Structure formats: structure tokens, C-alpha cells
């Protein structure tokens, strides 16, 4: 499983920019073109970047799926231990419930940074959609 910071580094690498480090990471995009040839090349580059970002998002989704599977396995292990020991005692049920809540809290804490990465990916992809529209409009006007 990849660290969310590594995903942010990969986003910056795909976009060919420096996104900074730490809490205040910001991706600043700047594109200029003057000719139709430059605009077409930029359009191809933007489409390729979007493909790479979508693939990265699929990897983040796979990491989230792995986290959930691990948590479900851990919960199953807790429940199996419960049934093999004191079938139905009040204190044992309470202990099992507490362990399951702890597993769920850990799962949520692990998934949250991944969701933030997915949101960042969605934002970048959306901004690139806007750029594609701008380029296509410019190309239509300047043919």
C-alpha cells in the first residue's frame, strides 16, 4: 500500500510541477500556447496526464479496498474468538463490540488520507477538463 504523501508526489510528477511539502502542498498549473501546433501538443499532453491521474486514482481505490478487507478480516477474527470462548456472556459481547469499534476507527483513520488524495485527483482532473475546453475553444476560433 502506498503512502498518501507518495501519491501526492506522483500527482506532482505527472503534472511536471513542484507541489511543495507538508500541510500547505499546492499544485500550481500554468500553460501557455501561441500557435495551433502548440495548442494541439498541449491538448495531447493534458489528455495523457488525465489518463495517468485516473490510473493513479484506481490505485488509491485499490488501497482503500485493501484497507477495508483487512479490517473485515480483523473483525471476523474478533468474532471467531468470541464464539470459541464464551458464547453469549455480556462482558464478552461488550469486549467484542469494543474491539470491532477500535478496528473500524483504525480503518477510518487509514482511509481518510486516501479520500483526500482522491479528492485532490478529482480536482486536478476537473481543472484539466477546463483547460482542455479552453484549448479546444481557442483552436476553434483560430483555425
Image (cartoon, rainbow, N blue to C red):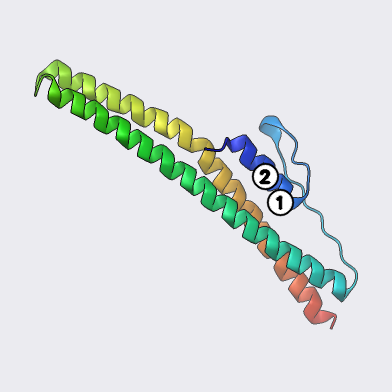
Residue at the farthest right position? 34
User: Measuring 20% from the left and 24% from the top, which residue is drawn there?
Assistant: 81
Q: Is residue 61 above or below residue 134?
A: above
Q: Position of residue 114 (x, y in %)?
A: 52, 40
Return the residue nearer the eye: 60 or 36: 60
Q: Are marks 1 and 2 in contact (CB under 8 Å)?
A: yes
Q: Position of residue 95 (x, y in %)?
A: 22, 19
* Disc 2 element: helix
Identify the residue under disc 1. Answer: 14
Query: Disc 1 versus disc 2: distance between alpha carbons?
Result: 6 Å
Query: Picture coordinates of residue 112 (x, y %)?
Result: 49, 37
Residue 64, quarter of the rendered image:
top left
Identity of the residue drawn at 38% across and 39% down: 68
Name which residue lies at 71% across and 70% down: 133
In which quarter of the view is residue 50 placed?
bottom right
Query: Quadrant location of residue 43?
Result: bottom right
Using the image as rendered, state which of residue 81 and residue 139 is in the foreground: 81
Outermost residue on the bottom side: it is: 143
Circle on res. 10:
2
Amino acid at each position: 500500500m502506498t503512502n498518501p504523501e507518495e501519491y501526492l508526489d506522483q500527482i506532482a510528477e505527472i503534472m511536471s510541477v513542484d507541489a511543495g511539502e507538508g500541510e500547505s502542498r499546492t499544485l500550481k498549473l500554468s500553460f501557455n500556447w501561441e500557435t495551433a501546433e502548440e495548442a494541439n501538443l498541449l491538448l495531447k499532453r493534458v489528455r495523457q496526464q488525465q489518463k495517468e491521474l485516473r490510473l493513479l486514482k484506481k490505485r488509491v481505490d485499490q488501497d482503500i479496498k485493501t484497507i477495508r478487507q483487512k479490517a473485515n478480516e480483523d473483525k471476523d477474527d474478533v468474532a471467531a474468538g468470541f464464539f470459541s470462548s464464551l458464547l453469549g456472556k455480556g462482558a464478552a459481547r461488550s469486549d467484542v463490540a469494543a474491539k470491532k469499534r477500535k478496528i473500524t476507527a483504525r480503518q477510518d483513520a487509514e482511509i481518510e488520507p486516501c479520500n483526500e488524495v482522491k479528492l485532490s485527483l478529482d480536482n486536478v482532473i476537473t481543472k484539466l477538463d477546463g483547460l482542455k475546453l479552453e484549448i479546444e475553444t481557442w483552436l476553434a476560433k483560430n483555425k
